[in-house]
Image (spheres, coloured by chain):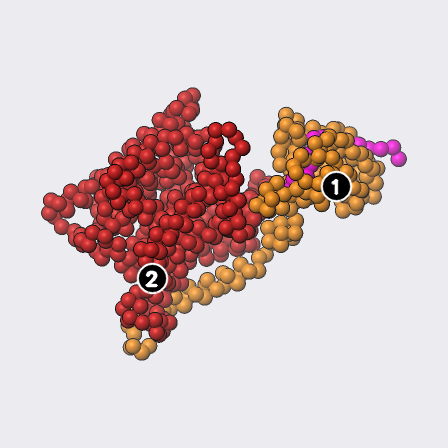
Amino acid sequence: MAALHCLQVCANLVYANQQPWHNSGGAVYQPSVDGQQDRLTRFVLLLPLLFVLTGTLIRFLAFRYHQPDTPWTEYFGAMCRWDCIWYVNLAEDGYSRFPVPDRVAAANWAFFPFYPILVGALGKLLPIPTIVLASLMSIVTAYVAVVVAWPLLGRSRRAYALYAAFILSGPISIYFTTFFTEVMFVLLTTLVFRFLGRSNYLGAATAAALLSGTRIIGVFVSLSLGLQALLDRRRTTGSWRGWLPGLLGQPKLVLAVFLSPLGLFLYIAFLHYWIGDGLAFSHVQRAWARQVGNPFGYLWQGLTAWSTTPGQWLTHSQVLALSAVAGLALTAVLGWRRQWPAALFALLAILIPLAAGLASMLRFMVAMAPLTITLMTLLARWRWLFALSLVTLLVSAWFVTLAWFGGNLALV
Amino acid sequence: MRLFDRSPIAFGAYGLAALLAVFELAVLLQALHPQVSDNYRAYYIDRTNTCLSQPVTGEYTLGTEINFRSGGPNTRELRPCGWDGPAGDGMHSIGETSRLLFDVGAAQPLSLMLELTGVSLEGPPVQHVDVSANGVALGTLEVTPGRTDRFTTAVPAAVIDGAGKLTIQLDFPDAIDPSKGRVSNTHWRAVKLSAASVTPTSK
């Protein structure tokens, strides 16, 4: 019954967008009861479920292969590495005071609260281990993130299939199916751009408010909202003149502007109350040796960090740098497609973390929904490329999951 | 449309936006004036210190030589900050300052022994280590990269505080940035500490 209810809710999500903003096919899909529509609904709702199954199977088999002596019941715990462990502790124990109980400089203030609080709150109600609960929540969130992305993929079945495989069964599905904030970041980013596509500023701002409480970079989507409003006004009036009074004359837009960064401001207020430093999430980066510098300098250093190990093609620094380069290239594609609000957000979401180094850049890039959605629309362009991409995604999931268990630093 | 022509919902939206703006401005102003300890401020905000002192007891039996290599005793209560490890070759200094704390009881003349090895990273031919006890300079050691030496220095009774605590501070003016500009000075390297002791000396 619950599953049926979930599918109904998801169906509503699929069709909530009646005014597609990126509809390459030109067709407008309305909720209807005809057979073709039903088949489409089933495709959109059921295909991701298939990839939930294949992804779980691949990752589980990789776990058994890598750790044959570990009981299978510890699968979710074994998948939890690096920042995941911080999130589990955060969901269970909340934020540290100063000095932190472990008596180290690194503290969990660096991790934004929305997703861990959500898991922690549900954990108070459900008596199951936090990592199991969080992993199940992540899988559900990833599923919903895929379903709501359907209109943004131009309603292309091939692009949708690739995106579903990428998120739920692809090489980096590890991030979206254990306890990282990336999965919530993807869902909320997708919602923001769906709402913006309909010029629903308040809807976008509500998702943006949650996004700014999920990762620091989320607050920059507020700029996309402002840019979308400007572009909408330009489209309506045909002129840039009087843009400021024009925007201020829209009460919903004004409210949206101040609502969208609310998650970040609430977190700052909490940190000030809790440890006396509202910007502790930024200051604590010093404990991880993060050094602000020229993003392109970091990029160049990463690209030229050649391997000295025989047989190693790429160093982890090169992988991280290449993922940033790929992100910039896809941002250029967004610009070329005149999706300016998404391009602006993507550019800031690449350059700002890059100014603190290459660490986690691969994870940051794959969690940028505007970029991965764009990539899938490119890979879906030709049937042969689609088939090759799909196979590559599924096969590489096995190897990357093994690399994850092996502690590959490019995946941190 | 003039302001007084607007609906109550529009007024509500503007009012709510104004409330949010005031709240966000207040939070921002508050964030610009952190209320934190000097220790916190120096490490996280002003970045004038790489050694964030942590609360440790300094529990120690006078005259005992402590092994700081992996496999040795748990030395956490002797290390307020500036150390990473233990590793097989000792406790690695991180940052430009490291500290040790010893609870030595009543004030008396002491002898401090440190067994140090200079890190083998590309850098200066010698690591200078400025040693101080409870803020009083004891001297400068010269530690050679890749070589392990024992250094002994006298600690006058006068520097021991009323609570019987002895904080040994090691400053590393030649600390090496292992990544050539990619990491902050909190992770620079200088020496490895493999053993230490504080021993009473005859009066």
- The reply to whether the magenta stretch includes residue A65 is no
* x then y, percent, for residue A411: 45, 37
Label 2 close to label 1 by CB (< 8 Å): no
Using residue B72 as the reference point, say whether residue A341 is left or right of it: left
Frontmost residue, B61 versus A397: A397
Discs 2 and 1 lie in a common subunit = no
Q: Which mark is residue B128?
A: 1
- For disc 2, the marked residue is A228
Q: Residue at x 35, y 74 (%)?
A: A242
Marked residue chain, label 1: B
- The vertical placement of A132 against A279, above or below, is above
Which hue belongs to chain A?
Answer: red
Q: Is residue B126 visible?
A: yes
* x then y, percent, for residue A382: 25, 42
Per the rendered image, the range of residues in magenta is B188-203
Image quarter (top left, top right, bottom left or bottom right) of the N terminus of chain A: top left
Q: Quadrant of residue B76?
A: top right
Using residue A129 as the reference point, say whether residue B129 is left or right of it: right
